[in-house]
Image: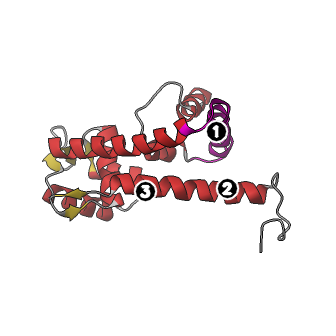
Amino acid sequence: MSLEQSGIVRDSTEYAEILAEAFVEVVQKAAKDAMCCEFASDEITPALMECLQYVYLHGASPIREIALGLEISVSAGSQLVDRLVKKDLVTRRENQEDRRLIVVELTDAGRELVKQMRKRRSSWFESVVNALPEPKRRALLEGLEGFLEVSLSREDKIDRACVKCGMEHVSFCVINKLKDERTSAR
């Protein structure tokens, strides 16, 4: 049955939801394709890459913070870190202020792998966005920013969105603006 036969019209929220799901699926697939690569003949899974990217964006981090940022258990975070240590992509060391805390840092190989993944993902996204005519490009940006402003203003998911985006922190980012507004409102 077609969308029209089901009663869904172009300006409906149902159609917007279908488009949003398709958009998320396409972007996630492209991100996974960029993240899943071969390293020393062992696959780097999306979960491992997400852990590497967290440390890349946040610097040396305790396992507890990594787990919190990735919304996984400390045990699962520790297992990810163990796998990354075996691949020589991260190191563990004791925190100098509190020896009970283990701090995870990227190795040079880990940092290079994250940079390669980010470059591949950015290249794909750039090729898609650049294929759009300028008015559609602008409309896409404004639409995505508007959607994030509304959806994140109703939820306490701003930090998670920031962790997931995988981009350096930039002042014009709508998520950073929302974070600043929340901070100044407190």
Q: Earlier in the sequence, mark 1 or mark 3?
A: 3
Q: How far apart are marks 1 and 2 (CA)?
A: 13 Å
Q: What element carries label 1?
A: helix
Three-letter code for the amino acid on which mark 3 is drawn: Glu
Q: What residue is rendered at 55% in x and 39% in y?
A: 131
Judge by depth and name the residue closer to the eye, 24 or 4. Answer: 4
- Determine if residue 107 is in view: no
- Determine if residue 150 is in view: yes
Q: Distance between the residues labelled 2 and 3?
A: 26 Å
Q: Which of marks 1 and 2 is nearer the N terminus?
A: 2
Residue 77: which quarter of the image?
Answer: bottom left
Classify mark 1: residues with Cα within 10 Å, few (<14), some (14-19) or many (20+): some
Q: Mark 3 points at which residue?
A: 71
Classify mark 3: residues with Cα within 10 Å, few (<14), some (14-19) or many (20+): few
Three-letter code for the amino acid on which mark 1 is drawn: Leu
- Residue 151 colored in magenta in the image: yes
* Residue bounds of the magenta highlight: 131-156
Residue 17 coordinates in the image, percent (x, y): 70, 57
Q: How far apart are marks 1 and 3 (CA)?
A: 29 Å
Quadrant of image for the N terminus: bottom right
Judge by depth and name the residue closer to the eye, 25 or 94. Answer: 25
The figure's colour scheme reads secondary structure
Residue 145 coordinates in the image, percent (x, y): 63, 36
Q: Name the residue under label 1.
A: 140
Residue 55 coordinates in the image, percent (x, y): 29, 44
- Is the residue under label 3 in contact with that under label 2 (CB below 8 Å)? no
Quadrant of image for the C terminus: top right
Q: Which of marks 2 and 3 is nearer the N terminus?
A: 2
Residue 22 coordinates in the image, percent (x, y): 61, 58
